[in-house]
Amino acid sequence: MDPSAASVREMETQLDIWAGKIDEFTATAQESHGWARIGLRQAIDDLKVKRALVRANLDQLKAAGSDNREDLRTELGKAWKDLEDAFQEIKL
């Protein structure tokens, strides 16, 4: 991933969108009952952890020197894909 200013802004915008979706899922979970509520809460917790990891990786990449930037890009790419997949898998 290229840490250009435009791509960083796009990633940050997507992270904000995902934060809003997590809030929506949380509201839905509060209206759910039984095992559905438990499963949704677990999925939400997983999304929060994965989103925080992406945020941390993005912040590290922004602050990194050129020496380890490639490794950080790889880590960010993996974390990003994992978060995208988790959003695709969530069942409401």
Image (tube, grey):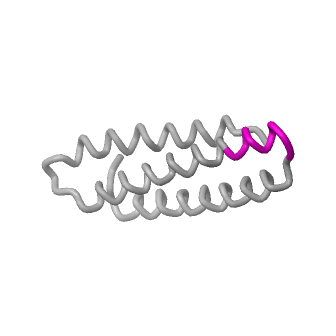
Per the rendered image, the range of residues in magenta is: 33-41
Does the magenta run of residues contain 91?
no
Q: Is residue 76 above or below residue 15?
A: above
The quarter of the picture where the C terminus appears is top right
Instruction: Give the percent coordinates (x, y) of residue 10.
Output: 48, 60
- Name the quadrant containing residue 89: top right
Give the side of residue 91 with respect to residue 86, left or right: right
- Farthest front residue in view: 34
**Residue at 78 percent of width and 44 percent of height:** 37
User: How many numbered dots are placed on residues in this image?
Assistant: 0
Q: Is residue 78 above or below residue 18?
A: above
Residue at 65% over, 42% down: 42
Q: Is residue 39 above or below residue 24?
A: above
Specify whether 31 is left or right of 27: right
- Residue 41 in the image, given as x and y percentages of width and height: 69, 46
User: Which residue is nearer to you in this view: 2 or 60?
Assistant: 60
Pick out the residue farthest to the left.
67
Residue in view at x 18 percent, y 46 percent? 68
- Residue 28 occupies quadrant: bottom right
Query: x and y percent of residue 14 in the render?
Result: 55, 57
How far across and down, in percent of the image, does residue 55 sit? 43, 56
- Dominant SS type (magenta): helix
Which quarter of the picture shows residue 60? bottom left
Whether the magenta-drawn stretch holds residue 40 is answered as yes
Taking the spot 60% from the left edge, 39% from the top edge, the residue there is: 86
